[in-house]
Amino acid sequence: MGGILLNREQIMEIIPHRDPFLLVDEVLELEAGRRVLAVKRVRADEYYFRGHFPQEKVMPGVLIVEALAQAGAVAILSMEEHRGKIAYFGGIDKARFREKVVPGDALTLEVSLDRLRRRAGTGRAEARIGEKLVCRCEILFAVGV
């Protein structure tokens, strides 16, 4: 892995998400339409920790999957034919969570796009903390006009 390829500002030029719902901080590797490796740095002041759970802050699994979907959207919307569009979350299959994600963790998000048709596709997604697998799932998406 090299350094940062895209920072938050550059990511926001590609996908429409904004705070407090932008869940990708950096892109480290990018093959438009094929693969992305990104990072979400989990901070103690994230809005969802106020209620999940105040006594033991744990990042909700649905937000881990959303972070993976946003990383995948960067790969899709970086394609010339999809620039300026929105990638909609179409579904999640085979999601499994193996570890807790807590403040201070750097969540590595890797999405490989399997089938990419004109306006829809699927991808294999994994989130890790270091070498530890946190979440694995398949994501489905559709690209809006």
Image (tube, rainbow, N blue to C red):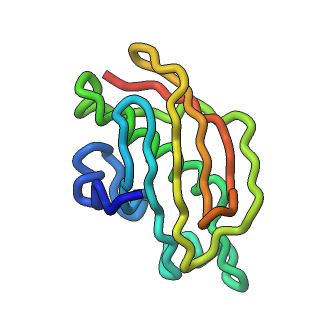
Residue at the limit of the structure toward the front, as seen here: 1
Residue 119: horizontal and vertical position, in percent? 41, 18
Q: Nearer the viewer, residue 128 or 87?
A: 128
Q: Which residue appears at 59% of the width and 49% of the height?
A: 65
Residue 80: horizontal and vertical position, in percent? 23, 27
Q: Which residue appears at 50% of the width and 30% of the height?
A: 113
Quadrant, the C terminus: top left
84 lies left or right of 30: left
Residue at the limit of the structure toward the top, as seen here: 118
Quadrant, the N terminus: bottom left
Quarter residue 118 falls in: top left
Up-down: is 124 above or below 3?
A: above
Numbered circles on residues, count? 0
Residue 134: horizontal and vertical position, in percent? 68, 58
29 lies left or right of 64: left
Q: Which residue appears at 55% of the width and 27% of the height?
A: 122
113 lies left or right of 13: right
Q: Which residue appears at 36% of the width and 59% of the height?
A: 2
Residue 24: horizontal and vertical position, in percent? 42, 57
Q: Nearer the viewer, residue 112 or 83?
A: 112
